[in-house]
Image: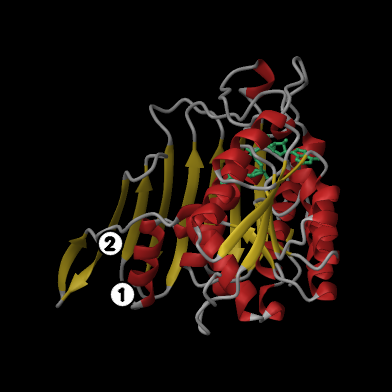
Amino acid sequence: MTSAAPEDAPRRLRAGVIGLGWAGQQHVAAYAEDPTVDLVALSAMEEHLLAEFGERHQVPGRYQDWKEMLAEAELDVVSIATPTFLHATMAIAALEAGVHVMTEKPMAQTGEAAATMVEAARRAGRVLEVSFNHRQRGDVAALKSVIDTGVLGPVYYAKTGWIRRQGIPGMGTWFTKAASSGGGAMMDIGIHMLDMTLHLLGEPEVTAASASTHAEFGPRGRGGSGFGISQVESGAPFEVEDLATAFLRLEGGATMLLESSWAQWIPEDLCYVTLYGADGGATIEWGGGPGNHRITVWTEVAGIPAELSPEVGEDGRHAAAVAQFLQKVRSGDVAAHDGSLALRRARVLDACYASARAGAEVQIEG
Ligand SMILES: NC(=O)c1ccc[n+]([C@@H]2O[C@H](COP(=O)([O-])OP(=O)(O)OC[C@H]3O[C@@H](n4cnc5c(N)ncnc54)[C@H](O)[C@@H]3O)[C@@H](O)[C@H]2O)c1
């Protein structure tokens, strides 16, 4: 006979994961490690991955057909880690089946598709969350705490970017096709920097974007990496940008420069946030791998100019993002967690791509 769970134990949740590439594997690990969750179902096209992860974590339900999984597995929560063009269809179906959804970033290819997901979450009364795991990093958490003390004063200018030396995800996979990804480096890694920086700044609205996009490496078959396990269509044209730059206006008059690149003539990967405040400045420098983070803060202490190096704690990453999602589900406050924040991010990217096409600044409606 099993003993009854203590009365204050969190409600056990039945979880599923769709997609078993790098991203999906992070969600699988997060659920498998959580003692309050039963990971009961996986879905992916690759039979060998279903077998490998199913056996490793003793997951009973293994499906190549995700709709069958939704119909049979009696899920409370599901993570969607499939190519971006599938996020909206899968999320809406899951929400309509009464399942709380965490989808990978970017939320969808367009703000319009993202808005349909938010509407579905509201209709269904279920949580919709987007996995912005980089904001769970130790450096971001530490700098956020520093900023929240007010030591920088009002931050009126931010520069942020992620520039890879050689990091175009699998050439000829969904990543490099416009119809399946919705965009290139900005959609893929720029979105993390946008999210992280807006989070650090306290979530100001972005009111306008002026951006440009370039594709100098991909079309020549250069700058590729091994990211993305999906089927490669060899010789498929490279249809997205490998570099995007954007100048963003924020409510209250602050501005942000955002650069994202999958491949560039630089010695090593570069990922940074630089904040300029009235009373202090700060930077995050990150070499692109686990750990390897540095924060520096410049301000005055007792009227004396000071350079501070706050200690960086452990990275929370996907496990922390999934834990936060589960907390939101258990809170029952579905109205506060309907995907609206991620929708705002999607609208900023829409405006950036529209601006790049038009060669002019684009306003973002509130
Ligand atoms: N948050 C992060 O740090 C991070 C990192 C990488 C990727 N991502 C995001 O995660 C998502 C997936 O990226 P990836 O690199 O893991 O992709 P991937 O191509 O490596 O893997 C995609 C997975 O989706 C599965 N899939 C595709 N169509 C399916 C279908 N119809 N039914 C069931 N499964 C299906 C594939 O079988 C595969 O297992 C993308 O949205 C990407 O932007 C996020």
Identify the residue at the far front of this view. Answer: 1
The percent coordinates of residue 274 (x first, y second) are: 40, 55
Judged left or right of residue 206, residue 276 is: left
Tell me the residue at 47%/28% (across/down). 165
Q: Amino acid at mark 1?
A: Val
Quadrant of picture, ligand 1: top right
Tell me the residue at 34%/64% (across/down). 142
Q: Amino acid at mark 2?
A: Val
Q: Which mark is residue 297?
A: 2
State the residue in front, 97 or 111. 97
Tell me the residue at 77%/21% (across/down). 237
**Is label 1 in contact with label 2 (beta carbons under 8 Å)?**
yes
Say which element carries label 1.
loop
Judged left or right of residue 59, residue 179 is: right
Residue 314 shows in this picture: yes
The percent coordinates of residue 326 (x first, y second) are: 59, 68
Ligand 1: does it lie within 8 Å of the C-beta at label 1? no
> Is 323 located above or below residue 8 in the figure?
above
Tell me the residue at 46%/62% (across/down). 157
Q: Residues within 10 Å of mark 2 (few under 14, many from 20)?
A: many
Judged left or right of residue 10, residue 338 is: right
Asked where in the image residue 53 lies, by quadrant, the reply is top right
For the image, the number of numbered tags is: 2
- Circle 1 is placed at which residue position? 151
Q: Residues within 10 Å of mark 1 (few under 14, many from 20)?
A: some
The percent coordinates of residue 196 (x first, y second) are: 50, 58
Rounded to the nearest whole Å, what is the CA distance between mark 1 and mark 2?
9 Å
Ligand 1: does it lie within 8 Å of the C-beta at label 2? no
Asked where in the image residue 145 lies, by quadrant, the reply is bottom left
Asked where in the image residue 91 lies, by quadrant, the reply is bottom right
Say which element carries label 2.
strand
